[in-house]
Image (cartoon, rainbow, N blue to C red):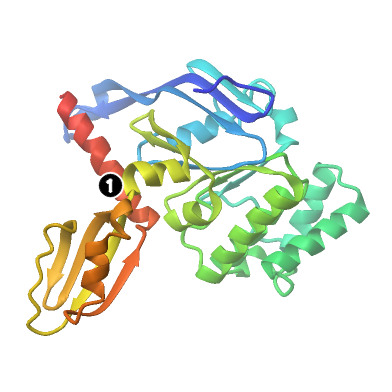
Amino acid sequence: MKNATGEDAIAINDVRKTFTTYEARSSSFLSVLSKRKTEKKALRGVSFSVKKGSITALLGKNGSGKSTLIKLLVGIMAPDSGTVRVLGMDPWKERITLARRMGVVLGAHPTLYNDLPPAQSFEYMRRLYRIPKNEYEKRLRHFIRLLELDDVNRRQVRELSLGERMKCNFIAAVLHLPDLIVLDEPTIGVDLPSTLKLRATALDLQKRYGTTILIATHILEDVKVLAEEVVILDKGKVVFNGSKHDLSVLFGDYKTVELYFAKNAKVNLSRLGTVVDRRDSYVKIEIRSDKARDKMLAELVSSKNVVDYNISTPEIGEVMSKFYSRVGGMRAKKR
């Protein structure tokens, strides 16, 4: 981990967290009287930092430790060892003070009251965070306009769609203009128009107010659109910590070439790259990025053998798939 500096909104150093669980020894009824004690190491020496004003994606498969780490960051629990500093504070010891400077959106846990309209919950947030009335109204108008919530602000939350509820949850979390926003699966299950609005509003907060954003997500399009830095957890350890560009260079430094051949065309493709798909007159090849301007490829796509072609960079989903395959292979070799 880089040394923590005054420019870091989050600084985590060698954090470990273990949970004790009890499992039945068998499926029989009496087995509940004799359970086996087991320990689950959720975090195994996690270290990384997040710069102020940046947007960082926290990625990892289920069971990687993301949820545990978020609970440590917001002060719900304390680490067994190591240090967690958020905006210069210990979240466990200073969670009330920290809460005034942080916003949290947990996709699976709503923050609004079902029987009340969002407008009343927003007013509660205003009083809780002591936001001046004029400033509050100005901010609320801005966020309602960005998220297109004019027609839902005064309906009961229980009557809103999932996308509308998530957008209202987002407003409730950012009305006090926090220095740091933690988003845990903010777009999961949300319709596309609402997802696009949520992303645009997050980017607006960063640009307008310099807000630091940490987003834990399984939606790779969120990473593609929002994130500058990426931290990837696997089985409680950091397996990647760097820029999105670095991740692409390490595991996506190639181009995808799709070729559509004329009938009865005979072409030797072995020297171009790796054929990953072939059916009828269609062939998909992966080539190194530096070969995208290769003379051989240029001659091929301009020949009468090729009816059409497409050259593209890999999507973040493809990059992540290759990354997890590499991590899995490295783990298998250690056994």
Q: Nearer the viewer, residue 40 or 307?
A: 307
Residue 172 showing in the rendered view? no
Give left or right: position of 76 versus 251.
right
Give left or right: position of 160 versus 324.
right
Judged from the image, the secondary structure of the residue bearing numbered disc 1 is helix
Q: Nearer the viewer, residue 128 or 59?
A: 59
- State the residue at coordinates (65%, 63%): 157
Q: Is residue 77 above or below residue 268?
A: above
The image quadrant that residue 76 belongs to is top right
Q: Residue 271, how many percent across, how many down?
A: 14, 57
Question: Disc 1 designates what residue?
Answer: 322
- State the residue at coordinates (32%, 66%): 311
Amino acid type for the residue under numbered disc 1:
Lys
Q: Is residue 87 above or below residue 59?
A: above
Q: Is residue 312 above or below residue 113?
A: below
Q: Residue 254, how many percent across, how many down?
A: 31, 53
The image quadrant that residue 247 belongs to is top left
Q: Is residue 90 above or below residue 186?
A: above
